Image: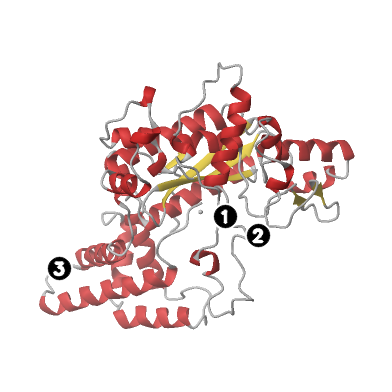
Amino acid sequence: MTSRPYFQRSAQLFETLSSEDVATALLNISKASYSKVSDERIKTLMKHIKVVGEHVMGSTHSRSTLRTKIHSLCFNLGLPSLFVIINPVDIHSLVTLYFAGVDLDLDRFLPEVLCTIYGRAQIIATQPVATAKIFNCLIKSILKCLVCGGVLGPTKASFGTVESQGRGSLDLHLLIWLKHEYTPAQLKENIQNQDFRDNLLKYLEDVVKEDLDVFRDETNDGTNTASDIRVSIQETDPITYEVVPACLSTPNPASDDFHRIFCKDVVRLVETSNIHKHSTTCYKYSKGKSDTSKTCRMRMPRVLVKTSNIDLSTGQITMRRSHPWINNFNEWLIMYYITDYVTKSTLAFYDMFALAQQGVKSIEQQRVTNSIDNAIEKSRKLVLRCYNMIASQQELSDVQVASYLMNYDDHYTTHALRNLFYYLN
């Protein structure tokens, strides 16, 4: 970058840049007196920091390049149809425990030999390589066998970004483009047709579930009644089992009784893993409010809806729901990834400016004692120091680091995208 002709002009701009200039810009941002930075020197510095950072996997700036790729797919294919979050539970995965060094016979697994949840969490926390390896294998299998295999219908593209959760494990935020040519305006127009409306609701009810009615009906074992489904709004605790269902073996698809067993397993998985329970994160946007005025950011509990419907005037779709606390799910995906947000950054915009200011100030202090370097070399050190200051404050989990070291992807997509470089003089 520093050998390019345009960097000479940047070096001239940086010669007059001081930490006070960055502090002034940061103050204006904090006061919201400017919608963007007007100082050409600071804008140029941030651009060069971005160029350095976008080549570092997992960095804040590399995430912005993924956003550009998503925009490219939107320009080429239109808006995505579905947003899916795939969040594997590593502490309940027997395969992950096996790769972490636990002596398990996966073909003849006995639940009583399994250690406690806390014990499994300790094992997983000390084996980030095993967790990253299984996550990469699992996501590739889900995308190839389920998503591209048609479990959500014919698709023409997908783009998913890997993110680290607060507990350190990885999840995938996935955008899916279904294979149809309807624009949002055309969809709103077509829902006026009764047949189209019925088919759309039928499709949505097939790929997205918001209750367990159909699965309870299919089990036919007499253990549950319709009254069991309509849980009281006060009952937020999920049903507990002696052994987490996700740790049990998957039924044989060749079995004559597979469908009934499958439905029963879906019920058990959803009851233990997919029923919402309020926590402090639910109310992080309600700080300072009284308990009566606080609202859950997950919008729980949900309103019960007897039948799915579409508002013809607004186009709003409301799905059938008989349980107030269940997070919506797809039975095939939840069965697959449990048994075995899209490009948000961990650093805010103003945090980057504050860290860049520290970088500029550090270089200023060095210039007092060492003024031998030419303008190009000084500017190179300035950009690199500012980037290192920003990168040093970015949170990375051990599983993320292990994934990057093993050269696993930080995103998964069906399309190959190429960068187009241009320079405007």
Give residue 222's position: percent from left, percent from top. 68, 34
Give residue 379's position: percent from left, percent from top. 25, 66
From the viewer's side, name the closer residue of 404 and 253.
253
Label 1, secondary structure: give it. loop
Q: Amino acid at mark 3?
A: Asp
From the viewer's side, name the closer residue of 358 and 403.
403
From the viewer's side, name the closer residue of 71 and 110.
110
Q: Which mark is residue 373?
A: 3
Q: Is residue 371 left or right of residue 175?
A: left
**Could you tell me which residue is drawn at 28 percent across and 41 percent down?**
129
**Could you tell me which residue is drawn at 24 percent across and 62 percent down?**
380
Q: Is residue 100 left or right of residue 224?
A: left
CB atoms at circles 1 and 2 under 8 Å apart? yes
The answer to whether 91 is drawn above or below residue 165 in the figure is above
Report the quarter where the C terminus lies: bottom left
Q: Amino acid at mark 1?
A: His
Q: Nearer the viewer, mark 1 or mark 3?
A: 1
Report the quarter where the N terminus lies: bottom left
Gap between marks 1 and 3 measured at Cα? 59 Å
Q: Is residue 230 left or right of residue 339?
A: right
Residue 20 visible in the picture: yes
Q: Label 1 neighbourhood size at 10 Å, few (<14), some (14-19), many (20+)?
A: some
User: Which of marks 2 and 1 precedes in the sequence?
Assistant: 1
Gap between marks 1 and 2 measured at Cα? 8 Å
CB atoms at circles 2 and 3 under 8 Å apart? no
Give residue 30's position: percent from left, percent from top. 46, 80
Residue beneath label 2, please?
A: 301
CB atoms at circles 1 and 3 under 8 Å apart? no
**Could you tell me which residue is drawn at 25 percent across and 35 percent down?**
101
Q: Amino acid at mark 2?
A: Pro
Give residue 370's position: percent from left, percent from top. 11, 74
